[in-house]
Image (cartoon, rainbow, N blue to C red):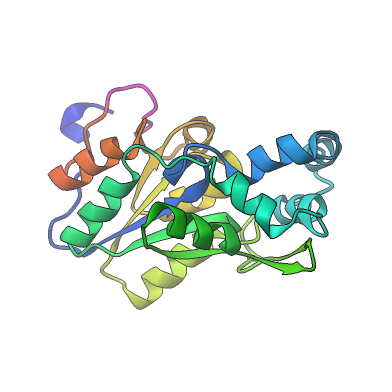
Amino acid sequence: MSEMNMPTIPSDRPLLVFCDFDGTFSVQDVGSTLAHRLLPEKRKRLWKRFETGEFTAWSYVKALFHGLSFPEKDLERFLETIDLDPGAQALLDWCRDEDVPFWILSDGFDWNLERLQAMNHIDFDYHANHLEYEGDRWRVDASRPSETCGCGTGSCKREIIASYRRSHPDAYCVHIGNGRVSDLCGAIEADLAFAKDSLAPAMDEAGHTYVPFETLHDVIAVLSSREVFTGSQGVTS
């Protein structure tokens, strides 16, 4: 895509920012990191079954974590090791100052998001799957799966963005993400997608445009200019 054909963010439409959490708003993927530490062999076995199509994204997560014995105090200590993206606070501040609605869309768990907000003294609206404790064991439930989207996640980002668009038809929806599995459908549904890691090549394969980024500071620079600047790498027309 040449610079003269770069898409621009219309100034006459209200902006709305949707942002993935794991690996995007946070540095680490909370669920993946936890699975590697606590359940390495089980994760490998289940992931192979996911790759063969036996599991959907959500049924894989449920098979992995439902019934996990991991007390609250241990989860709390683990969450203290999770870092936010260097631009996370700045993005929240920018959206607040510009009166731009901001939502975290996560295929992770609400329990973790609530604790991480408190730990980092931040606040955001979110959609996520549900985690609650039965004694020291996890009980997990999907929050918003979709029967029509092929993502197979417990919290379908395409459906969430489309639902918002139905009630706010003038909104210009932005999606920020990093994952092929849980972010692709939301990135395609959005008016403008920011992508990195496995989401970027997935967008290439799907033939959809996106803006590559490294940190959320890069996203702020684009949104604040209301123009999309990007090199040739990672952009399809």
**Start and end of the magenta stretch?**
231-236
Q: Residue furthest bottom?
A: 167
Is residue 151 something one can see in this rendering? no
Q: Quadrant of residue 36?
A: top right
Magenta residue check for 234: yes
Looking at the image, residue 16 lies above or below residue 76: below
Left or right of 169: which side holds 205? right
The residue lying at 13 percent from left, 43 percent from top is 225
Left or right of 78: which side holds 125? left
Locate the C terminus and report the quarter of the image it occupies.
top left
Locate the N terminus and report the quarter of the image it occupies.
top left
The residue lying at 33 percent from left, 40 percent from top is 216
Residue 96 screen position, x and y as percent: 22, 61
Residue 233 screen position, x and y as percent: 36, 22
The residue lying at 68 percent from left, 50 percent from top is 74
- Closest to the observer, 25 or 78: 78
Q: Quadrant of residue 217?
A: top left
The residue lying at 79 percent from left, 42 percent from top is 50
Magenta residue check for 13: no
Left or right of 125: which side holds 94? left
Residue 170 screen position, x and y as percent: 26, 69
